[in-house]
Structures are given as C-alpha cells and as structure tokens.
Image (cartoon, rainbow, N blue to C red):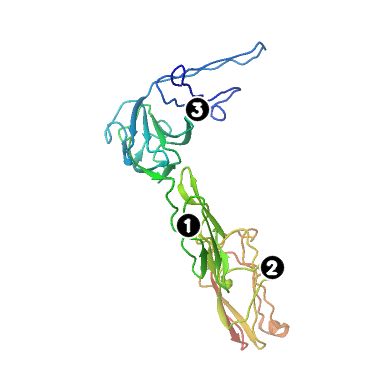
Amino acid sequence: MGGQHNRTLLGSYTGFGVGTAIPWTLLATSNMAQLVLRTDESYNYAQGFKIGFQGYITTNITRRSSGYLYSPTYTGEYPSIQRVWTIEVNVGEGVKMTPVTFSLDYDRNWLYVYKEELGIPVLLGSYTGPIFPAELSAASNMVHLVLSTHNPMADDDFKIHFEAFSFSDPCLDPGTPDNGYRTGDNFTVGSVVSFGCNDGYVMLGQGQERLTCVLDDHVGIEWNFLTPSCEDPAHACVAAGGRYLYEEEGEIVPPRDVMTGRYQTNLNCSWTIVADPGKVVVVEFPEFDIEYEARCRHDFLQIQDRPYLGYSKIMNLALEEHFASYFEPPLQYRISPLEGPLY
C-alpha cells in the first residue's frame, strides 16, 4: 500500500480457509496496493487462490469534531456501490459513532467499521440489516467505514452521527452504593476507585470492590466493572452455616443481580427461622418466581419443617419437601402462637 518508497504491510497469509486467519475483506487506505507471492521449490497439492479487487469511492472527513455520515442518496434508492468514508480527528482523540437510522438488506449489504492502528486498518465490526450498536467507539483518531452493497433495497439507508472524544476525558462518576462508601475521586483513564459497605451490610451484585477507568474499543472510556450494591444481610445468603433469624417477623430475599434484578445463579443459601417454645413459624409467599422444573433438579427452594413430634401426629402437619414455581421472592415469615392447625 502506498508509493514505492512508503509501503505499509497490511498482512502476510498462508495456508487455507477464509474468514479465520485469512480475512474476508482487506481494506487499503490509498489508491495503490501491491500483492507479492513467493513460493519455494517444494511440491504441493494446493490450488492457489482467487482474489477479487475493486476500487471504492472515498470520502475523507478531517479535523471535524462532529458531524453526520449519510448513505448515498439518503432516504432514496441507490445502485450497487462500494464506498469508503474516512474520519480523521486530532491525535489524542477517538471517534464515537451513534446511529440515527440504520437499515440495510440483511446479509447482502454490509457496513464495515475499521480503526487505524499503526497505519493498518483493524476491523471493529461488520453490520447488516437493522443491526448497529447503540454506540460504537474507536480508540483511534482515524476510522474507516466501508459500505458494500449488492442490489440495495429502496429502504436501505443510514444516518450515523460521529463525535470526537479526548483520551483524557474521565469516566462517568460511578456513584456510591446506598449503605456504603467509595474511596477515590479521580476518574481519569487508569484511575482506580474502591468500595465498601457500612457495618451491618454486605456487598452484592455483579459489581466489584475495585473499578478501573479504561479506554476500550467499542465502549470508549468506561469503568471495567459495575458499581456494587450494599444490602442488609437478611437479603443475602450466608452459605457457610446459614443465617439464624430470631425476629418475630421479617422478610427473606435471595441475592439479586445488580443489572437485571433477578436472583443470582450458583447459590447455596440457607436461613433458619427460630421461634420461642410454644410458637410455630408461619411462612407466606406474596411473590415467588424460581426457574421451573417439575422434579426440582435445577433451581428450587426447600423448606424443612421440624414440628414437635406429638403436635405433628395430632394435627397431621407437614410441608412438601421442595418448592419450584412461577411466582417471585421475597417470602415472608411471622411467629404465631401454637393454637390449632394452620391452613
């Protein structure tokens, strides 16, 4: 690629197969590309290769901090076309792209997005149909968008907003969890903040105790993990030894995922509700929703009843061994005097 004395190696390829080590599409960024084939004297059964090439119409957008890219004859029909847009912002900046509209004939027309890295285009993603990220960032000051169409449809079009961002921009404030605290107020790239929970609360969720502000392709400048949450231990499970509850009434909630609000996977929780002699525990289910499997081989809540032996025989009181249903925790409990059967 480039002139006789200013070439950049785009890649060296051997073996067979396309789409893995050998790319489907390779983009040159100048009007000249040179291919060099070398073979040795050893005999082989390989059949060689067949390479198609095509010149693309190019549009260069330089030194603009923001703007829009439009498909050819935006909102109108256009012929089969190969086109390249190159966005170049200042050194020390990246490019953030946000679709306003995006629709291409699925699996026939594609938009390829590359970032320039040491003079070599690196593919960030290939997009077709209505599929384009809500936000796509490139950690490079030069980005190439390549449109390849074959018999485009009348409604094929896109409008993409681009905007430069500085590599020195900070991450967003990660906040402080309720019932917890944060250590660190520097949010620039490479900075670390840590979190802890106040006495009487435990850290839950997919978040991490330590977060680092990172510069990353696709997401731009972001924290590498979510902010954790701090919850009352009654809402957490303590797998080792379980948790004993002596209150007259209360609520039990399984640990929940910070993002989805659903209960977490790979749990092994236990709670023991203890009533004074002469009283029984009443468990109520205002909501209940655990993955259903008729034989309770996956997710289930097991409630073990230990009634007084004589009372169990007289009142014929017993609980089923497992519960698996379509209704959603929490479950509630209360202590009731031991006065006759429960219904």
Q: Name the one closer to the observer, 183 or 289.
A: 183
Q: Left or right: 56 with respect to 12?
A: left
- Reading the image, the residue beneath label 3 is 24
Q: Is residue 165 visible?
A: yes
Percent of width and height locating residue 333: 57, 78
Query: In this orientation, which residue lies closer to the viewer: 102 or 316?
Result: 102
Q: Quadrant of residue 291?
A: bottom right
- Residue at 51%, 24% (x, y): give it: 9
The residue that disc 2 covers is: 240
Which amino acid, by three-letter code, is at mark 3?
Answer: Trp
- Mark 1: which secondary structure? loop
* Residue type of the residue flagged with mark 1: Asn
In front: label 1 or label 2: 1
Q: CA separation, marks 1 and 2?
A: 37 Å
Q: In x, y percent, where is residue 195?
A: 54, 63
Please name the residue shown 65% across and 64% down the image. Answer: 268
SS of the residue under disc 2: loop
Q: Position of residue 312 (x, y in %)?
A: 69, 81
CA distance for labels 2 and 3: 53 Å
Residue 186 image label: 1
Looking at the rendered image, the disc whose residue lies closer to the viewer, 3 or 1, is 1
Q: Residue 308: horizontal and vertical position, in percent?
A: 70, 83
- Circle 3 — which element? loop
> Badge 1: how crowded within 10 Å, few (<14), some, or many (20+)?
some
Query: Crowdedness of circle 2 by 10 Å Cα count: few (<14), some, many (20+)?
Result: few
Would you identify the image quadrant in which residue 280 lies? Answer: bottom right
